[in-house]
Image (tube, helix red, strand yellow):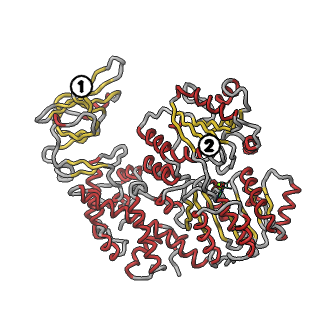
Amino acid sequence: MLKDSAQYVKGVGPQRFKILNRLGINTVGDLLYHFPRRYEDRRKFVPITKIEVGTYATVKGEILKTGLRRSKRGLSVFQIAIGDDSGIIEAVWFNQPFMKRYFKIGQEIILYGKVERYRQLQMNAPEFEFISRSESFLHMGRIVPVYPLTQNVNQRYLRTIIDRALQKYDSYLSDVLPGGLREKLNLLPMNLALRYIHYPQDFAQRDSAYQRLVFEEFFLLQMVLALHRRRRKEIELGIAHRAEGELVTRFLQSLPFELTAGQKKVIGEIEDDMRSKRAMNRLLQGDVGSGKTIVAAYALVINAQSGFQGAFMAPTEILAEQHYFLLSKLLMPLGVSVGMLISSMNQRSKAQVLEDIKSGALDIVVGTHALIEQAIEFTKLGLVVIDEQHKFGIQQRSLLRKKGFNPDCLVMTATPIPRTLAMTVYGDLDISTIREMPKGREPISTFAIRENDIKSAYAFVREEVKKGRQAYIVYPVIRKAKLAELKAATEMHERLKKDEFSLFNVGLIHGQMRSDEKEKVMREFKDKKIDVLVSTTVIEVGIDIANASVMVIEHAERFGLSQLHQLRGRIGRGPHPSYCILVTEPQTDKAKLRLEAMLSSQNGFELAQQDLDIRGPGKFFGPAQHGESELKIGNIARDMELMELARREAFGLVQCDPHLKASQNYALKRILSEKYGSAKINLLSA
Ligand code: ADP
Ligand code: MG
């Protein structure tokens, strides 16, 4: 079976087995899933004189000459010349004199590398493989797989044992995808998919093999999410809230503005969830400034009207305070009591709040981590709201929920992530999205300038501050490293204070400060005691400082696109026109793309999608986010459509057969239990 040790394959003895282990190969299954990192088309070779300088190319020829010499700077240079009927190319290796041992004049060889031209055509340290004139069909005359290697295994060995494994285990390569599904989607059977991913006869075959394997991987992931959600909806009975009532009506009447269509839409979705007797698990995503807080307030009002207490958790004290003040202002007049719990409060006030929560005197408590750290007892917790969800782990979410009996849960994030990514990261949450901004927002004007023109940016900041505005100046690092050219927040703070902004109050905030120090600085900024705030990326998420209308981001090429967008979201929150100045010298194509995107769009979702396209998915995930780490083959950015297809099919299947009882789903059920461990088997049981 596929769980057999790889030693069952002929040619894998105990020693080789140890070496294969270093490649993560223990079982036959691992071996078959050791996929090529590229392919070489050895059906016919391009003549040496026809290869293009500057590209990666494969050439075949005979070794004509070898030689070891020293360069002027004293490096050893090992060099060979190979030729075919058309011409000659050289390969060089610097500082690897031992390479000499491998090559003999007259040998047939294949080289793969980047082609350059000096006096001769040349490749620097190319990959190489010796071949014999009567070569086996595995290595020549076809599209040949090229694998990731480690020391003491070469391509030819891996090709040989993988081919053997494919033959010997062919009949065990059964399908876990239900037959009907495979036919409907026109996917290859498993044994062929694996054969073609290693040994395709043409590239179309390789592509359909890839599709099939990626689909299966995504499908299994989506099955787990679908089953998880299904199960939760089945078992987790929660609270059926009452969404209509006098309190809600009065709340709506008291709002100082008209809700946007987007806010109304998500409110509708939240209402439906809250009315239902299943526990709500909803993610509310909306760009910075799209007005999520008021939506949360609305949910808290429904909750209070239904006679329950609500908890609202924010990642920092200053944000918690901001929410507390807003909710007090909106809700106290309606007779809803709001309290706050943060660590920096004195013992007596804390004890009082805890007492009021326990007695039921408080309807809503707003706080920080303190809400889960303190020994809080609610009388009847009915709704948990978590702001800026990415700052908290899933554990913290559930810790807070456990303070009640299956309360509804609403988590909010201003980090928009593209849809496919949301499908995996937040796969088990229902998602509501606000796509538009409240009317009357002044757009932010974004400019890019070169380092040479930085003085003009500082002059502009001075003008704005004289008008009464405040500004952020952002740097990529906290302290200057030796020799590095990068400007750093700490040093620039000293300089700007003395020079450019000597007439103003200049503050500093960065990630290595204690959190109470950070809070203090943010508060001073909010209270306008600081005019210009020098910072790194730590500037609070979600903080609403309407008077700050200018942001200068130095070395902007150092930041990711989503990060730049989040930073820019700190301004443009008030009635004043706002300006974001990116100081940058983009060197790479990617950096240029990011800059163009920032200049042309202010839509977080669009930018997040572009960011994903530019960077690939890796960086998007914090540590051990659900799902992604398990993906071996597929690439979420590239294979987005497959992910959507897999999700549709998986959720559809769970809808029809929630416990996978139908016989055609049996193999699927088994693999899910195996793959996702005993803890998750109960996903499947009735
Ligand atoms: P975020 O989604 O980033 O948390 P906030 O909830 O902090 O955004 O809202 C940003 C600002 O927009 C706040 O000052 C809020 O009062 C205001 N706001 C929210 N909804 C509306 C609306 N429908 N019309 C006008 N202003 C609104
Ligand atoms: Mg917010």
Q: Is 197 situated above or below 242?
A: above
Name the residue located 46 percent from the left edge and 42 percent from the top edge. Answer: 596
Name the residue located 68 percent from the left edge and 53 percent from the top edge. Answer: 315
> Which label was assigned to residue 566?
none
Q: Quadrant of residue 127?
A: top left
- The answer to whether one can see residue 400 in this image is no
Which kind of residue does numbered mark 2 sit on? Pro
Which kind of residue does numbered mark 1 sit on? Gly
Q: Quadrant of residue 483?
A: top right
Residue 675's spot in the image, x, y percent? Answer: 46, 67
State the residue in front, 108 or 222.
222
State whether label 1 is within 8 Å of ligand 1. Answer: no
Q: Quadrant of ligand 2?
A: bottom right
Image quadrant for the N terminus? bottom left
Query: On the picture, is 478 further left or further right than 678?
Result: right
Residue 464's spot in the image, x, y percent? Answer: 66, 35
State the residue in front, 147 or 254.
254
Name the residue located 86 percent from the left edge and 57 percent from the top edge. Answer: 349
Q: Label 2 to label 1, Cα distance in Å? A: 69 Å
State the residue in front, 48 or 160.
48
Name the residue located 40 percent from the left edge and 66 percent from the top edge. Answer: 645
Query: On the picture, is 263 further left or further right than 90?
Result: right
Give the labeled residue for mark 1: 67
Give the labeled residue for mark 2: 577
Answer yes or no: do the residues labelled 2 and 1 have beta carbons within 8 Å? no
Of labels 2 and 1, the one closer to you = 2
Residue 197's spot in the image, x, y percent? Answer: 29, 58
First of labels 2, 1 by sequence position: 1
Residue 166's spot in the image, x, y percent? Answer: 28, 62
Label 1 environment density (alpha carbons within 10 Å; few <14, some 14–19, many ≥20) = few
State whether label 2 is within 8 Å of ligand 1. Answer: no
